[in-house]
Amino acid sequence: MSIIEPKIDVLLDRTDNDRFLLCALASKRAHDINDMMRGQRDRAIQLQTAVEIARAADTKPLSMAFNEIARGEVSHDPESIDVKNH
């Protein structure tokens, strides 16, 4: 598996060339997106609207997270990272 878009160089630039930080940010954001999508699916099932379910399942959460990181919409606070245990 490889990342085609966004380019890995762009993603690494956004995370100070720290691939472990990139993985942590993408994982956390994808988890948040997945939780939001699960909520939309539950609501759509209650409303019985298949269109909302299909729309939510169109893009994978990790792909959405990488795109948000590349656009600069996801960031981190360097002060909150424990460098000694990182």
Image (cartoon, rainbow, N blue to C red):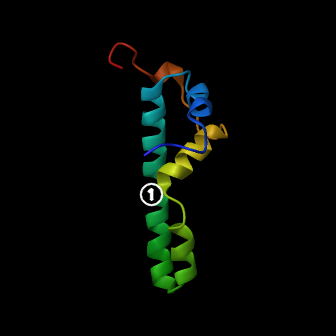
How many labels, in total?
A: 1
Residue at 61% in and 42% down: 6
Comparing 46 with 68, the one in front is 68
Residue at 53% in and 47% down: 65
Image coords of residue 53 (percent x, y)? 51, 75
- Left/right placement of residue 30 relative to residue 70 reads left
Residue at 35% in and 12% down: 84
20 w.r.t. 37: above or below: above
Image coords of residue 13 (percent x, y)? 61, 26
Residue at 46% in and 83% down: 46
Image coords of residue 25 (percent x, y)? 48, 36
Quarter-wise, where is residue 11 in the image? top right
Quarter-wise, where is residue 76 in the image? top right
Q: Residue furthest left?
A: 85
Q: Residue furthest top?
A: 84
- Left/right placement of residue 72 relative to residue 3 reads right
Residue denoted by label 1: 34
Density class for disc 1 (Cα within 10 Å; few <14, some 14-19, many ≥20) is: some
86 w.r.t. 42: above or below: above
Q: Residue furthest bottom?
A: 48
Q: Quadrant of the C terminus?
A: top left
Comparing 4 with 34, the one in front is 4
Amino acid identity at mark 1: Asn
49 w.r.t. 11: above or below: below
3 w.r.t. 84: above or below: below
Image coords of residue 61 (percent x, y)? 49, 54
Q: Regarding mark 1 in the picture, which secondary structure is present there?
A: helix
